[in-house]
Image: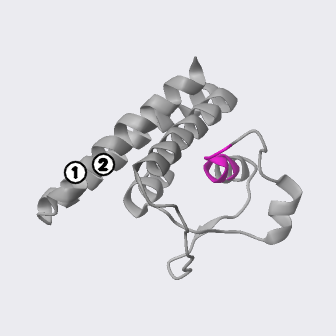
Amino acid sequence: LGLGELFVFVFFGLVATVFDRSVLLEHGLDERFLSGEDIELRRRLARNGARLGVSEQTVVLHRFEDGFAFARGQWLADGGGLARTLDKEGWRGAGLLALPALAAARGIALSVARREMRFLAYYACYLVFNYAGMVRRRT
Protein backbone atom coordinates (compact mmCIF):
# COMPACT_ATOMS: atom_id res chain seq x y z
CA LEU A 1 0.00 0.00 0.00
CA GLY A 2 1.74 3.12 -1.19
CA LEU A 3 1.56 6.39 0.70
CA GLY A 4 -0.61 7.97 -1.98
CA GLU A 5 -3.01 5.04 -2.01
CA LEU A 6 -3.16 5.00 1.78
CA PHE A 7 -3.93 8.74 1.71
CA VAL A 8 -6.79 8.18 -0.73
CA PHE A 9 -8.31 5.30 1.27
CA VAL A 10 -7.98 6.86 4.70
CA PHE A 11 -8.61 10.52 4.05
CA PHE A 12 -11.23 10.36 1.35
CA GLY A 13 -13.24 7.37 2.48
CA LEU A 14 -15.41 6.05 -0.31
CA VAL A 15 -14.10 7.33 -3.60
CA ALA A 16 -14.78 6.62 -7.22
CA THR A 17 -11.78 5.16 -9.04
CA VAL A 18 -11.95 6.11 -12.70
CA PHE A 19 -10.63 3.87 -15.48
CA ASP A 20 -11.74 2.66 -18.90
CA ARG A 21 -14.60 0.19 -18.99
CA SER A 22 -12.57 -2.04 -21.29
CA VAL A 23 -9.96 -2.39 -18.52
CA LEU A 24 -12.63 -3.64 -16.11
CA LEU A 25 -13.89 -6.11 -18.70
CA GLU A 26 -10.35 -7.31 -19.43
CA HIS A 27 -9.22 -7.73 -15.81
CA GLY A 28 -12.55 -8.32 -14.07
CA LEU A 29 -13.39 -8.50 -10.39
CA ASP A 30 -12.18 -11.42 -8.30
CA GLU A 31 -15.39 -13.37 -7.69
CA ARG A 32 -14.03 -14.89 -4.46
CA PHE A 33 -14.49 -11.54 -2.69
CA LEU A 34 -17.70 -10.68 -0.84
CA SER A 35 -16.30 -7.21 -0.10
CA GLY A 36 -13.05 -5.44 -0.86
CA GLU A 37 -13.07 -6.50 -4.49
CA ASP A 38 -12.74 -2.86 -5.50
CA ILE A 39 -9.59 -2.38 -3.41
CA GLU A 40 -8.06 -5.59 -4.78
CA LEU A 41 -8.89 -4.62 -8.37
CA ARG A 42 -7.44 -1.15 -7.97
CA ARG A 43 -4.20 -2.55 -6.50
CA ARG A 44 -3.95 -5.20 -9.23
CA LEU A 45 -4.49 -2.64 -11.98
CA ALA A 46 -1.91 -0.28 -10.47
CA ARG A 47 0.66 -3.11 -10.34
CA ASN A 48 -0.05 -3.85 -14.00
CA GLY A 49 0.60 -0.22 -14.95
CA ALA A 50 -3.00 0.84 -15.60
CA ARG A 51 -3.68 4.54 -15.40
CA LEU A 52 -6.09 5.24 -12.54
CA GLY A 53 -7.55 8.43 -11.20
CA VAL A 54 -9.71 9.42 -8.29
CA SER A 55 -12.73 11.44 -9.26
CA GLU A 56 -13.38 14.60 -7.31
CA GLN A 57 -16.76 15.15 -8.88
CA THR A 58 -18.35 11.75 -9.49
CA VAL A 59 -21.34 11.21 -7.23
CA VAL A 60 -22.96 7.84 -6.64
CA LEU A 61 -25.75 6.70 -4.37
CA HIS A 62 -24.86 3.88 -2.01
CA ARG A 63 -27.88 2.02 -0.74
CA PHE A 64 -27.41 0.20 2.51
CA GLU A 65 -29.89 -1.32 4.88
CA ASP A 66 -30.50 0.34 8.23
CA GLY A 67 -29.44 -1.15 11.51
CA PHE A 68 -26.50 -2.47 13.44
CA ALA A 69 -26.76 -6.04 12.12
CA PHE A 70 -26.27 -4.89 8.53
CA ALA A 71 -23.40 -2.55 9.47
CA ARG A 72 -21.68 -5.31 11.44
CA GLY A 73 -22.00 -7.67 8.49
CA GLN A 74 -20.53 -5.06 6.16
CA TRP A 75 -17.59 -4.36 8.49
CA LEU A 76 -16.89 -8.09 8.86
CA ALA A 77 -17.05 -8.51 5.08
CA ASP A 78 -14.75 -5.51 4.56
CA GLY A 79 -12.20 -6.97 6.97
CA GLY A 80 -12.49 -10.31 5.21
CA GLY A 81 -11.85 -8.58 1.89
CA LEU A 82 -8.72 -6.94 3.27
CA ALA A 83 -7.53 -10.33 4.58
CA ARG A 84 -8.19 -11.97 1.21
CA THR A 85 -6.17 -9.22 -0.48
CA LEU A 86 -3.35 -9.87 2.01
CA ASP A 87 -3.57 -13.59 1.16
CA LYS A 88 -3.14 -12.77 -2.53
CA GLU A 89 -0.40 -10.16 -2.11
CA GLY A 90 1.61 -11.44 0.83
CA TRP A 91 3.98 -8.90 2.39
CA ARG A 92 3.45 -6.55 -0.56
CA GLY A 93 0.00 -5.81 0.91
CA ALA A 94 1.15 -5.51 4.53
CA GLY A 95 0.16 -1.83 4.65
CA LEU A 96 -3.47 -2.93 4.45
CA LEU A 97 -3.18 -4.08 8.06
CA ALA A 98 -3.07 -0.44 9.15
CA LEU A 99 -6.02 0.69 7.07
CA PRO A 100 -8.90 0.08 9.55
CA ALA A 101 -6.92 1.61 12.45
CA LEU A 102 -5.97 4.71 10.47
CA ALA A 103 -9.48 5.19 9.10
CA ALA A 104 -11.01 4.76 12.57
CA ALA A 105 -8.46 7.13 14.13
CA ARG A 106 -9.29 9.75 11.50
CA GLY A 107 -13.03 9.35 12.10
CA ILE A 108 -12.64 9.54 15.86
CA ALA A 109 -10.40 12.61 15.64
CA LEU A 110 -12.85 14.39 13.33
CA SER A 111 -15.78 13.45 15.56
CA VAL A 112 -14.05 14.85 18.64
CA ALA A 113 -12.89 17.98 16.80
CA ARG A 114 -16.44 18.60 15.55
CA ARG A 115 -17.96 17.67 18.93
CA GLU A 116 -20.01 14.94 17.27
CA MET A 117 -19.56 12.33 19.97
CA ARG A 118 -22.44 10.21 18.67
CA PHE A 119 -20.09 8.92 15.94
CA LEU A 120 -17.46 7.55 18.34
CA ALA A 121 -19.30 4.26 18.79
CA TYR A 122 -19.57 3.90 15.00
CA TYR A 123 -15.82 4.22 14.50
CA ALA A 124 -15.06 1.95 17.44
CA CYS A 125 -17.31 -0.74 15.95
CA TYR A 126 -15.84 -0.14 12.50
CA LEU A 127 -12.38 -0.77 13.95
CA VAL A 128 -13.30 -3.87 15.99
CA PHE A 129 -15.38 -5.60 13.33
CA ASN A 130 -12.96 -4.88 10.45
CA TYR A 131 -10.20 -6.59 12.40
CA ALA A 132 -12.57 -9.36 13.51
CA GLY A 133 -13.38 -9.92 9.83
CA MET A 134 -9.68 -10.10 9.03
CA VAL A 135 -9.11 -12.66 11.78
CA ARG A 136 -12.14 -14.74 10.74
CA ARG A 137 -10.86 -14.86 7.19
CA ARG A 138 -7.33 -15.85 8.28
CA THR A 139 -8.43 -18.69 10.56
Image quadrant of residue 93?
A: top right
Point 54% across, 43% down: residue: 78
Point 57% across, 31% down: residue: 83
Mark 1 touches mark 2? (CB < 8 Å): yes
Whole-percent x, y for residue 18 in the image: 66, 70
Whole-percent x, y for residue 139 in the image: 58, 17
Task: For mark 1, give the secondary structure.
Answer: helix
Q: Which mark is residue 40?
A: none
Point 67% across, 44% down: residue: 34
Is 79 rendered above or below residue 14? Answer: above
Whole-percent x, y for residue 50 in the image: 74, 59
Whole-percent x, y for residue 12 in the image: 42, 63
Which residue is tagged 2? 123
Figure colour scheme: one colour
Q: Residues within 10 Å of mark 2 (few under 14, many from 20)?
A: many
Which residue is tagged 1? 120
User: Is residue 1 visible in the rendered structure shown here?
Assistant: no
Q: Is residue 100 magenta?
A: no
Secondary structure mostly taken by the magenta-highlighted segment of the chain = helix
Decide which of 99, 95 is in the foreground and name it: 99
Q: Residue furthest bottom?
A: 57
Is 76 rendered above or below residue 51? Answer: above
Looking at the rendered structure, the kind of residue marked 1 is Leu
Q: Residue furthest top?
A: 139
Left or right: residue 130 versus residue 90 is left
User: Is residue 75 visible in the rendered structure shown here?
Assistant: yes
Looking at the rendered structure, the kind of residue marked 2 is Tyr
Magenta residue span: 34-41
Decide which of 63, 44 is in the foreground and name it: 63
Left or right: residue 50 versus residue 97 is right
